[in-house]
Structure formats: C-alpha cells, structure tokens
Image (cartoon, coloured by chain):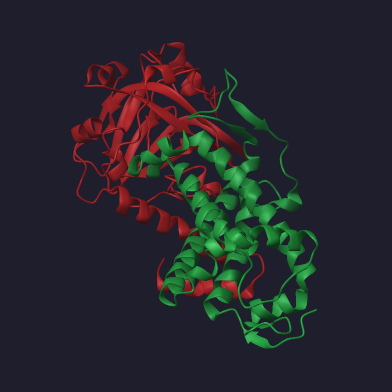
Chain colours: A red, B green
Amino acid sequence: MNRRHLLLASAGLLSGCKILDEGTGRNVLASANGLSYRAQRFLGGGTALAPEYSMSDIRQSQHPNGVTNPEDLDYQALAAGDFADYRLSITGLVENPISFTRQQLINMPSRTQITRHDCVEGWSCIAKWTGVPLSLVLNQARPQISARFAVFKCFDTIEKSLSGGIKYYESIDLIDAYHPQTILAYGVNDQALPVANGAPLRLRVERQLGYKMAKYVHTIELTDRLPGNGGYWEDNGYDWYAGI
Amino acid sequence: MPNGKLIYRQSIWTRLTHWMWAICLFFLLLSGLQIFNAHPALYLGHQSGFEFDNALLVLNPFPGWATIPSYQDLGTGRVVHFFFAWTLVGTLLVWFLASMLTRRVKDVLPGPSDLRALPADIAAHAKLRFHHTRRYNPLQKIAYSGILFVVLPLMILTGLTMSPNFNATAPWLLDLFGGRQTARTIHFGGMVLLVGFFVIHMVMILAAGPLNELRSIITGWYRTDEGDEA
C-alpha cells in the first residue's frame, strides 16, 4: 500500500460509513492480509513443509467443491477422448514456451503426498495426491528473471455473466510455485484424477486454502503482475494470500 | 452505593487496552459467526467427515443480525476477522508490556491470599454484596487473568492452527490441539466462553453500580466504600 492509498484509506475510515463496502475502508481492513502474508513468509520462510499424513488418515474420497463437471464444449470434447488431446501450455515470461501432453507429465519424475485440503468454508479433507512438481515443469520453460507470479488458466466456466462466461483462474507467487510440495496432480488416492476433482490436471499448493488450487488447468502463464485481483474468488472479495 | 473517597484506580494503559479489546472482540465475534456460517458444523480430529461421522455439533447458521456483514459474505467476514485479530494481538502485547513495566500485572493475578478469601468472596457475590476497593476481589482476578492469560492466548493459538501455512511453520500446534478441526471446535468453544464472560461482566457492572464502574474505566477515578484505605 503506497502513501496515496494510505491517505485515501484513512479518509475512508474517517468518513465512517460504508466501511465494509468495496471501497477504501475495506482496503484498510484488507491490508491486514498483506501483513499476514509478510509475517507468514518471514516466520515460515519459503521452504517449510506442510504436514503430511499416513494412509490410515485417508478415510474418505476427496470432497469435491466448486465446479465439479465443466459444461464447456472444448473440455467436454477432451474428456470424451480421455484427455489424449489435452495439452498443458507454459506461456508468458519464459525463455522457452512449451506444452506437455498428459502422458509427458506422467513420465516426468513424480511426487506423492498425503495432505490435508482446507476449504475457505472451514472444512478439511485428507487425500493422497500424485503429480509432477511444478518446479520441474517451470524449469523446462526457463522463467525469465522478471517473472514473479504463476497464473493458472482453467477450462471451467465458474460464472455466467451478461458479457459471457467467466473462466476460473488463480495465481501464486514463485516462492509457492517452486515449493517442493507444489505439484500438478493427475492422481488422487491411487486413482486417475476424477473430473469432479479437476481432471486431467489440478494444482496442489499445500500451504494455502482450497480456492488457490485451480482445477482443470490448461495454461500456466508467468507474469510480473497479477491479472485482476489474481483469481476468480479474489475478484469476488477473497484475499489473494490464502495461507490463513 | 459507595460513598468513600474517589481514588485513581485504572491506569491509562488499562483503560485504553480495555476499550481496544471491547472493539476488537465485538468485530471478531460477529465476523467469526459470518465465517462459521460458511460451514456451520464442528468436528473432532484432523478432517471433516463427509463419508464418516466425526461431527460434534451441527448448527443452523446464525441470523444476519449476529454477523458482519449481515448478509452472507465470507470474503469480507475474513477480511474483518483478520484485521481485528492483528489489532487484538497488538493490544495484548501493549497491555503485557505496560503491565510488566508498571509492575501492575499482579493486580489481576490471584495469589494465595486471594484463594483463602475465595469462599467468602463467592458468598458475598451470591448475596450481591459488593465491596468497592482499590484492589480487584478474588473472583475478578480469576476472571480477568483467565481471559487474559488463558482464553485469549488459546483463541490466538487455535486460530493460527487453522492456518495451513502456519501448520507448516509450527506443526506442533496441530499435535497440541489434536488436529485442525479440533482446533476449530476449541476456537468456537473459546468464543462461547468469551460471550459468557461478557454477559457476566455486564451483569456485575449493573449490580455493582454502573456509573461508578463506567467512570473508572473511562476516567480512571473510582469511588470506594467508606473506610476503605485508599
């Protein structure tokens, strides 16, 4: 928050009214999220691992939320062919824009982890995730020095508006993108990732809440700034940093 | 009503932090109920049973008058909650520091003499017979120190235990509380204790003489019973 924002924000506080609406008053309160982000990064650094659980902690299938069956025609066509024609594209601030088939991703070194999925709503669910570390995929694309964020673009239309459908998207910083537990998962609980959980590929960012973990990912764009507020839910009032 | 001397009872630090806590806890409670309403069920253990049953309590959502915002808006509820959580922690730190530096922390810590006087104090409270003295009575000390040293730290720690990033930083908190969902349940229980404290706090103020009590927590000046050595 720069000085101008601070002044505007204090003006909003003084005026007192509409403090919780989309406005300067809300921005003052939301600045606590930046404090949480910096404090958590300071305390935990970039490397602390999320707790991992044992097989006996898996007591149910992964509870699906949000979009569970995209109606988008391009997605439906890929799903009908068991994602044989699916491609993951890495674009943006990279030296080597590249794309992968699902089989190419599966052939790369994999990581399997039993972790707890925490939804912003308050519930948790433990499952075993298998996928390729995002760092390996990004390394092949060779991020440019100016890249700061990874933006995940998805197949699923999460909201239909008058100006057309809004597709789900999300973003994380490169600290989380290169975290060893950050994987592009193609399997859950020893099965191929089901459509309800984001087939063929979903993100796992184990130190943040569920809405950061985009499902149905088709493109990862590296950028030096966030598009919009950094994600579909962020555009609807959720905090960009969801480690809390 | 007391008709003894007016004494300067509450320091500026006590009064400032008292009202900061009042504001923080008001917003934390109402935004907390907003957050709770997104999934109004409490569980024991690490996770929430969808295909098995580990629910301790399943409630109806709290009504709009009890939440901030009054309509369903989880994102704003979280923004409000975390802002006032930081403010509460800052206020607690200020109070701890000021209490240590001014050596007033013992004002709220019950000692052996308080425990000896406890039965008589309980009897006096039961008869609604209040003594207006410079010092807090044993029940007050137990209530205030219980909130400041037990319930509020417990709320902060269980709140942090719900943070997936803080779980990576301090996984021992998950072990301490028995899992994220148990921590969430304890967080809710702490809220019930705080609301209970607030209700009793209000009843006691009304019973002990609200104008005198309010004056002391606003200006610091408190009228004692006649004959109380001030």
Q: At 62% across and 82% down in the image, what residue appears?
A: B220
Above or below, A213 relative to B190: above
User: Which of B225/B74 is in front?
Assistant: B225
Q: Is residue B221 above or below residue A2?
A: below
Residue A23 seen: no
Q: For this rendering, which residue is in front, B216 or A235?
A: B216
Asked which quadrant contains residue A90, the reply is top left
Name the residue: 64% across, 50% down. Answer: B193
Q: Position of residue B218 (x, y in %)?
A: 65, 79
Asked if residue A218 lies left or right of residue A180, the reply is right
Residue at x 27%, y 38% (from the top left corner): A179
Percent coordinates x, y for residue A91 in the rendering: 29, 38
- Left or right? Give the position of B142 relative to B104: right
Residue nearer the viewer, B32 or A93: B32
The N terminus of chain A sits in image quarter: bottom left
Q: Position of residue A233 (x, y in %)?
A: 52, 43
Can the viewer see residue B104 in this picture?
A: yes
